[in-house]
Amino acid sequence: MNAYNKNGKKEGTWEGYYSNGKLYYKENYLNGELHGKHESYWMNGTPMIKSNYNNGKQVGYFENFFDDGKLNLKRYSLLILLFLNQFVSSQKLNLNNSIGFNFNDNDIKVYATSINSSNSFESKNLSIANSLNHNINYSNKLNQNEFSNKLSVGFNKNKYNSFMDYQTNYSLSRNLKFDNLIGIGFGRKDSLNKFKIGYSYAILYQKITNQNLNYFRHSFRLKISQEYSNYSLISEIYYQPNLSNINNYSIFSTTKLLYKINSFSFVITDIYNIMSISNIKRIHTITFGLNHKFVK
């Protein structure tokens, strides 16, 4: 007890006492650094501080008491504020939204609009992302209404991540009124030269309610992006075959080319969707529009 190692640094358990002989503190050292439990006491013997250290840094719990043994809530409030400050300062919000319009003034006038968004929120290892694509085509009546929204909640660690996805699809052309997919998966992010590459795998359960169809699907995803000072290219593709029948599959891809002017961009969006079990197997849309990106 109260010993030094061969390098002259504190080692093991150390204790200090008041002049009346009562214990003042008891703490542990490793090579001169606080390491392990640390406890200190008021002169009346009640605890003052209880905490834990790892190589000189305070980790885990930290409790501070009044001399009557009651917990110092003011100190706890300060610790909570410090935690919240750290939590807020580590947040990252990314909002990326675009809208496009198209009008064909032929014998039959055609109006079309497209909304695409990719929004995400990150805080340390937690991420929440939502991507949406909505295309509408109108000529005398509503001819096309294609909607897809995917919500993903993930846990990230270095280059790797695990996630849970929930996707909802609606298609007027294919008579899909309630097409829902839910699943779990894992992925990885890499970079090659100036390209950012993300790829993942998931198992999905699909339920098309109005057609009374149910499937389990693989989901293979590849995303490639490249950014320069004035323009960027983003391409993402999903391949989702049925677990028991590879001839039953879906392919969904989105490619964006953006020319940036401050936080706004002119954008060309190409959306390509194949559903092998549908009477309308292929839907392909190209739109021109304006994009706004906000990062905080």
Image: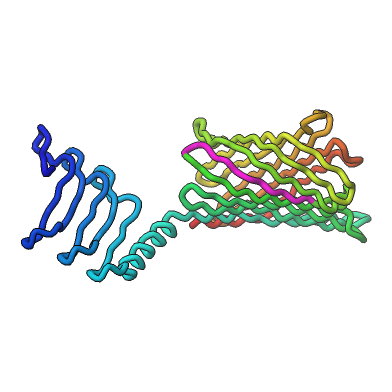
Above or below, 32 against 267 in this view is: above
Give the colour scheme of this rendering. rainbow
Q: State the residue at coordinates (60%, 41%).
A: 233
Towards the viewer: 145 or 275: 275
Question: Residue 79 in the image: x percent, y percent?
Answer: 34, 62
Q: State the residue at coordinates (83%, 29%).
A: 247
Quadrant of the rendered image containing residue 221: top right
Towards the viewer: 119 or 211: 211
Residue 228 horizontal side relative to residue 38, left or right: right
The stretch in magenta equals 158-169
Number of disc labels: 0
Membership of 193 in magenta stretch: no
Above or below, 169 against 42 in this view is: above
**The N terminus is located in which quarter?**
top left
Above or below, 215 against 86 in this view is: above
Residue 166 horizontal side relative to residue 178, left or right: left
| Magenta residues, dominant SS class | strand
Q: State the residue at coordinates (60%, 43%).
A: 163
Towards the viewer: 267 or 71: 71
Residue 20 horizontal side relative to residue 172, left or right: left
Question: Residue 76 in the image: x percent, y percent?
Answer: 34, 65
Towards the viewer: 39 or 190: 39
Question: Residue 64 in the image: x percent, y percent?
Answer: 28, 63
Q: State the residue at coordinates (50%, 31%).
A: 193
Question: Residue 7 in the image: x percent, y percent?
Answer: 10, 34
